Image (cartoon, rainbow, N blue to C red):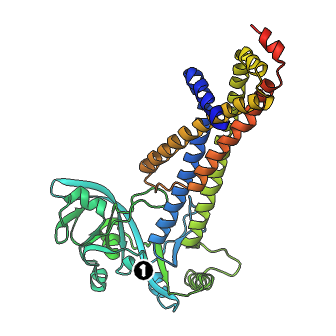
Amino acid sequence: MILEAVRLALRSIFRNKLRSFLTILGVVIGVAAVIAMVTVGQGSSAQVTASVQSLGSDVLVLRPGSRGFGPPGGAPSRRFTLRDAEALTSLPMLRAVAPIANASATVVAGNANASTSVTGSTEAWADVASWTFASGRNFNASEVRAGAAVCLIGQTVRQTLFGQADPVGQQIRVKSVACEVVGLLNAKGAGSFGQDQDDLVVMPIRLVQRRLNGDDDVDSIQIGLTQGTDTAVAISEIQTLMRERRRIGLDEDDDFSVTDMKEVASMLNSVNSVLSGMLSSVAAVSLLVGGIGIMNIMLVSVTERTREIGIRLAIGATGGQVLTQFLVEAVVLSLLGGVVGIAVGLGLAWGAGVFMAIPFTPDPAVIAMAFGFSAVVGVVFGYFPARRAARMDPIEALRHQ
């Protein structure tokens, strides 16, 4: 009986192709929007997690100013110095300390050039930030102390300046500073906010301070903790030391911040989850609109086929059989919209992943839920028109013109 009802439903649907397409369009849009939003949100969360993990486990970031992110309030806070970073190495729970001085510059090699970010740091930078080398080596402590003209480059800079050739041993010019490439970093891809982590040049911090920035400021300090260290204890020790060095009184607030990257990942993932949930809820309204469209068209279909319904009832069809026929037709319409919506939603999510450089992480549970919800929409909104058809008086239906 059900198979016969499905066959009749498909025949009715394909008999009115344009109307059927417009009917399922609302379901398609709703299902596609929900799947695309959830998949993009999960991909973004995965990207954030991977980006934070790429910084290394148990990494803290020490910055001047009372805020970890966003524009600082009030007067600019004092920058750190290399002596601050050296003082931190006295704390036993710290595995490595890497002071950072940032700059932007145009790098040139032969006829090729690129605008990129320049990171000045010490030999500890690669260890703290968990960078590995595709070829070459890290610069050493003596090169850092002397401010030697050596550098490491990321894969994006390598591709722009040298193509697929090995850059190790080659000379590049960073602004007016000529330096030798001693190491090529392995690729890391996009960061938490979509930035290209491989678009960078790393140089000894004293070289960046003297030749590029013209000061001795340290913009931030990345800190790697020893395995098993209690993060809260480490942060407290760092804050105590920095308050002493910066002569901050007992009644004064810190003019620096210590950020735990794991907490940043958790915060960003929470924000992603909330946004994805809100957008998915808005998208789900389209499913409600699509269900109303199905009910409207099924009511029209019942009215158009009143005489057919009367004939079926007159020759012995039961009200339950008529109800099943129209209910199955509504469910088939809704499921067709669900299948097409799933395909469209996954396609949109994949395209967004490529454009935003985030992983494509479809969730089978979400796909199954969206498909099941589309079936429920067909049942709920198809029941009233089907019941109306089943309750028709055969004599009155046969009189209908």
Q: Which residue is mark 1?
A: 82
Q: Quadrant of the N terminus?
A: top right
**Quarter where residue 321 is shown:** top right
- Where in the figure is residue 99, as x and y percent of width and height? 43, 76
The amino acid beneath tag 1 is Leu
**Quarter where residue 72 is shown:** bottom right
The answer, for residue 74, to whether it is visible in the render is no
The answer, for residue 18, to whether it is visible in the render is yes
- Residue at (65, 46) in percent of width and height: 372
Q: How many marks?
A: 1
- Where in the figure is residue 204, as x and y percent of width and height? 31, 75
- Residue at (46, 48) in percent of width and height: 350
Front in this rendered view, residue 209 or 129:
129
In the image, 139: left or right of 131? left
In the image, 314: left or right of 40? right
- Where in the figure is residue 364, as x and y percent of width and height? 56, 55
